Amino acid sequence: MSIESGLSTATKDFLVRSHGHFINGQWVASDSGETFAVHNPANGEVIAHCAAGGEAEIDRAVKAARAAFEGPWSRFTSAQRSRVLWKIADLIEQNFQQLCELEILDNGLPTPLAQYVCGMVVPEFFRYYAGWPTKIEGATIPASPQGKLPGQVFSYTLREPIGVVGAITPWNSPLPMVMLKIAPTLATGCTLVLKPAELTPLTAMRLAELCAEAGVPDGVINIVNGFGDTAGAALAAHPSVDKIAFTGSTEVGRKIIHAAAGNLKKVTLELGGKSPVVIFDDAKLEEAIPGAARACFFLQGQNCMAGTRLFVHEYVHDQVVEGIAAAARAMKIGPGLDPSSEFGPLISAEQRNRVASYVEAGLIEGAELACGGKALSSPGYFYEPTILTQTQPDMTPVCNEIFGPVLCVQRFGDDDLDDVVKAANSTIYGLSGSVWTRDLGTAMQMVRRIDSGQVSVNMHAAIDPAMPFGGNKQSGWGREFGKEGLEPYLKTKGISITW
Ligand code: NAI
Ligand code: MG
């Protein structure tokens, strides 16, 4: 009996439906009638078919979003928006099993991680943003425009929703990526047209339905399915979209900026990373070793914050490499639906080939293999957790974002703080990073000098709804999460009144 036969009825019923676009509260097909297949990366089988949208569907969705923005949604009080966000969190919990199963089937992540995402991360994020609508405030300003005296003029600022938001999300963590766009949209009173990743559209569609069930009016959250160079490009270029929120590759991020130039829409970008993990010789290795393994191999390394460049002090280099290699070899590789799996498949055959080619390039350039380095022969797109040692900053797998389970190790010596900072920062990216030490002085210096949007000490990827997250350098523009994550969805109006 296959693992899939144990799926809940809710999941089975969802999969066999015909999946269109969610526009103005209705499921609709594409004008062209075109569809694409959605695959389970654990076995390569087709699990669903989805309508492929283009310019026409994007235009219809943007018009619906505009009408909702100017109409019913603009009359919601901030307290009503709070209640809707809280209700969405409750509904996510009520649909926990189905969301877990769809996310695993679509993306391949292991069950415990899916349970953490659907049971904790996503509902708690919506609850965090449920607190914000009633706290978005302007200021009164002691201004004297045109020489007005105090008491003759009243100046203040209004924080207004930016308008219609276009969002484009990637496949590596589908539901959280969609959550990151929907929650600030609703908290600020914007409306949304979302194009989910064509590789993983399922939970985005289900979440749109849960938003409607929670009381979000028609047209506020719209989903157009389809490919990047058609639906995605049409959304990024649409003249009636006020802002684009994009998460994905740095290469496509650049295209988004060009497409957005037409109407100068505002752009936020959450792009690639090549984050450093720095382990000093005084680190508590029984925590640093599993921590570094998780930092790189979490989500099979298909994770923008992954700690993929490891810098280890020479005194502990061999012990750390052997420790991480032992952890990697012990990971149970298998389909995410098998609850004992700890490490799932990559998203596609293409992604697996990409990962393999980076490993091969590294070996040709002189890196050594400490473990892994092979694709599994079983069906599905599995690739072993892999460690390359003796790497140099200019090697192909060290300077490129691989987006797979490949850890590149470099060593450093005593009194090399300046050198290790320089090496850690010698990348076009600047998203995350971690430092492992018991010395507070070393930690304080390192966190200030690592050039990235997030640095943690004795932990990696310290994500929390309240903590701003985003990239320096070519890792992006702007921040998501926390209060700062609301800013790109708001605009400020300065108002002066005299009488
Ligand atoms: P991608 O950047 O092509 O896809 C991300 C999203 O952008 C998808 O929804 C896609 O349909 C859309 N898109 C693609 N081309 C577009 C265009 N011209 N206009 C508008 N939207 C467009 O990422 P891909 O090809 O799936 O993965 C390739 C590499 O990108 C990965 O190996 C990884 O290095 C990086 N990546 C980084 C992510 C991150 O979170 N930082 C997420 C996904 C990929
Ligand atoms: Mg692409």
Image (spheres, grey):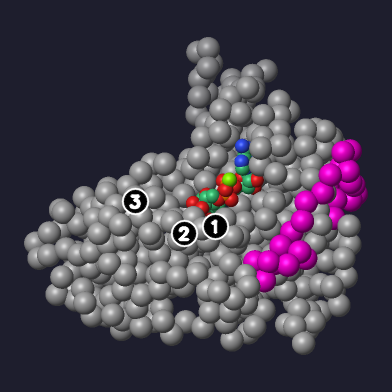
Task: Give the secondary structure at mark 3.
Answer: helix
Q: Write the residue at 40% across / 73% down.
A: 372
Which stretch is magenta? 19-47
Q: Write the residue at 89% across / 38% down.
A: 31
Instruction: Count neighbours of disc 3 (C-alpha within 10 A) and say few if under 14, some if 14 to 19, many if 20 or more.
Output: many
Counting from the top left corner in percent of width and height, residue 228 is at 66, 42
Q: Write the residue at 41% across / 69% down.
A: 373
Q: CA distance from mark 2 to mark 3?
A: 11 Å
Q: What residue would you read off at disc 1?
A: 351
Amino acid identity at mark 3:
Thr
- Pick the residue in front: 387 or 342: 387
Quadrant of res 433? bottom left
Quadrant of res 369? bottom left
Task: Give the secondary structure at mark 2.
Answer: helix
Q: CA distance from mark 3 to mark 1?
A: 16 Å
Q: Write the residue at 29% across / 52% down.
A: 395
Q: CA distance from mark 1 to mark 2?
A: 6 Å
Counting from the top left corner in percent of width and height, residue 97 is at 75, 77
Mark 1 lies within 8 Å of ligand 1 (Cβ measured): yes
Quadrant of res 40? bottom right
| Left or right of 285 in this view: 216 | right
Amino acid identity at mark 2:
Val
Earlier in the chain: of badge 3 and badge 1, it is 1
Amino acid identity at mark 1:
Gln
Marks 1 and 2: CB-CB under 8 Å? yes
Work out which quarter of the rendered image holds the C terminus and state it: top right
| Disc on res. 396 | 3
Work out which quarter of the rendered image holds the N terminus and state it: bottom right
Q: What residue would you read off at disc 2?
A: 355
